[in-house]
Amino acid sequence: MTSMDFFGHQERARRSSRRLVLLFALAVAGIVLCVYAAASALLMGVDDGQGGFFRLDVLAVVAAGTLVVVGSAALFKTAQLRSGGGAVATLLGGKPVPMATTDPKERMLRNLVEEMAIASGVPVPEVYVLDGESGINAFAAGWSPADAAIAVTRGCLERLDRDELQGVVAHEFSHVFHGDMRLNIRLMGVLFGIVCITTIGRIVVNSVGRGAVRSSRGGKGGGGAAGVVVFGVALIVIGALGVLFARLIQAAVSRQREFLADASAVQYTRNPHGIGRALAKIGGLSTLASPHAEEASHMLFADGMRRHLGGALATHPPVEERVERILPGFRRQLASSRNMVEAAAAVPAPALAAGAAGFAGAAPAVRPGALVAAAGDPQARDVAAARALLQQLPLEVAMAARDQARADALVAALLLDRDPARRERQLAGWRQDHPQLAHEAAALHLLVARLDAGLRLPLLELAMPALRAQPAAERQRLRTLARQLALADGRLSPFEFALLRLLEHHVRLPGEEPPRPPGRPAPLVRHAADVAVVLSVLARAGAGDDEAAAAAAFGRGHAHLGAMAPMQLLPAAACDGADLERAVDALARVSPLGKRNLLAACAEAAAADGTLTTSETDLLRALAATWDCPLPLTAGSPPAA
C-alpha cells in the first residue's frame, strides 16, 4: 500500500473548493436565465406581449432576487453548521456518546476513535451515534481536525465486529486528514441554496393557488392568479433541474475521494478484511431515515439514499467495485458465493508492505524527510503504538482525562514543575481561589511525573473531548490558569508553548471563530520574517546555549527553503512566546504545498544533529497541529527491526 500525499490531497481539496464555487456560479446563472424566461412569459401574458420578451429591467430584478435567495440560503445553511462537526451530527439525529459510557458497543467505538486520533496526532474528536438509524453508515464532519466529529449509525454498532468497525472509523479519519470535511460542509450549503428555488415555487403554488380557487368561486376572474400559479410551477421545475445538476456535482466531487479513504483505511489498520467485510455487509442497508440524509449523502461512508437514473446521481462508487479494489479477486469469488460477506471472507488478503509497531520515543534517530512525508498519513504502527500508550496509562490518569470534572486538573498537573519548590510557588498563586482544583492537580502530578515525557501531548489529546464539553466559564478559567502556571517562572518552555497552543487552538470560547483557511493562501516566500522566528526557536530548542550548533541548525532549515530570502538566526530575546505565536498564526495562512516546505524546513532545523529531543518533538507536533497537518505518533522514527 503506497504512502498518501497529504499535502497534495489538501491542495487538491482546496482546488476542488474553487471548482465548486465556479460550478455553483454556473448553476445559479442557469437558474437566473430560466427564472427570467418564466417571468418574461408571465409578463407577456399579462400585457399581451407589448413589452417584448427581452426586458433588461426584468432581468436585473430576477438576477438580483435569485442571487439574494440562493446566496442567503447557502450562507444560512453554512452558518448553521459553523460550530463544526457536532452541528452536522445533531442535524442528522445523532446523540453524543458519553465519555464514560457503559454501553459496550459505544465503549468499543470510543476506544477505536481514541486510538486512531492519538495515532494520527489530532485531538480526539466528538463521537456521535445515530440511534434512530438501523442501517450501516457513518460520516466525519467539521471544518478542521479541531472541531471534527465522527458519527456512526446504531446499525453500524450492532452489525459490525471490532475489525469491521475499525475499518469504518479509519475510513472516516481519512476524510478528516485530507480536507474533505470542509468541502462537504460547503457543498451542503450550496445544495440548500439551490433547493430553495423549488421551495419558493411550492409556496407560490400553495398560497396563490388557493386564492385563485376562491376568486373563481366568487365569480371574479382568476386569470392573473392562474398565471402566477403557472410561474410557481415553473419555479418548481427550474429548482428540480437545478437540484439535478447539483446532485451530479455532489456525486462527481465525492466518488473518487471514497476510493482514497478506503485505501487509507487499509493503510492505517493493515487489515483489508476489516473494511472489506464492512462494505460487503452494507448491501442495501446504508439508507438513512433522516429527512436531511439527501443533503448530507456525499459525506457518508456509503450512499444514504436510494438512487435512480442508473446510479448517475450516486455519491459513492458501487460497493462491489470498492471491495474489489480492497480485496482483489472479490468479484470472481462472488460468482461462487452465497452473498457478499461470504465472498469477502473467502478472498485472501493482499500482501502489504511490512510495518512495525513502536513508540515515537523508542528510537533516537530521526529522518526529517520521513517525518514530513508522514504528516496526515498514519500507519499501522502508529495505531499499535497508540493502543499500547492507552494501555500503559495509569487508570487514575486515564479516568481523569475522560472526566469532564477532572480534565482541567489533569491539564494543570501537566504544567506543574517537577521541582517541589517551584511547584509549590505555582500552586500557591491559586490554591486559595481554587482549592479543590489545586489539590486534584497536585495528586495527579505525582502520577503524571512518572510517565515518559513523550506521553504528555498525547494525554492532552485524549482529554480534549472532556475539556471542550465544559461550560464556557470553566473553559475560560482553564485557559487563564494554564497561562498563569506556564508563565509562573517568567518564560515558556517548548512543552508549555505546545500545550498552550494546542489548548487554545482546540478548546475555544464563545465568539471565537473555528479555524478557517484563508480565502486566498499567501505564498511562503512572503513570510520570511515569520519563518525566521520559527526556525530560530526550533534551532535553539535543540542546541541550548551552543550558539554555533544553533546557527548550524538554523542554516540547515533555511537551506531547505531554497528561494526564501536571506535570514539570520535571531537572538533568544527575539524568540519569546508572543513572537512565536504571532509567527505561527501568520504561517497558518500559507497554502498546503507551502506548508509542506515549511514543515520540512522545521524538521531539518530540529533534527540537525540526527535526533529529536522531547522539546523539539513537542514543538514540531504543536506547530504541525496548528497548521492542520498533524504528525502521527511515530512520525520520523525509523521502523523497528
Image (tube, helix red, strand yellow):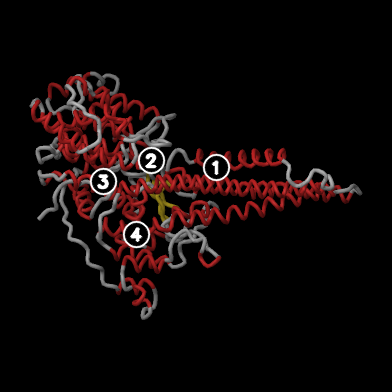
C-alpha gap between disc 2 and disc 4: 23 Å
Q: Which quadrant would residue 435 be assigned to in this image?
A: top left
Q: Nearer the viewer, residue 113 or 71?
A: 71
Please, what is the three-letter code of the amino acid marked with disc 2? Asp
Q: Disc 3 vs disc 4: which is toward the camera?
A: 3
Q: What's under tag 4, amino acid-wise? A: Asp
Where residue 483 appears, as percent x and y from the top left, is: 27, 24
Residue 555 tag number? none
Q: Image point 33% across, 71% down: which residue?
A: 344
What number of labels is visible? 4
Where, quadrant-wise, is the N terminus in this rendering?
bottom left
- The percent position of residue 320, horizontal first and vertical second, equals 40, 69
Question: What residue is disc 1 on?
Answer: 74
The reply to whether discs 2 and 4 touch (Cβ–Cβ < 8 Å) is no
Instruction: Residue under label 4, please give it.
Output: 262
Mark closer to the chain start, 3 or 2: 2
> Secondary structure under badge 1?
helix
Residue 439: in sight, yes or no? no
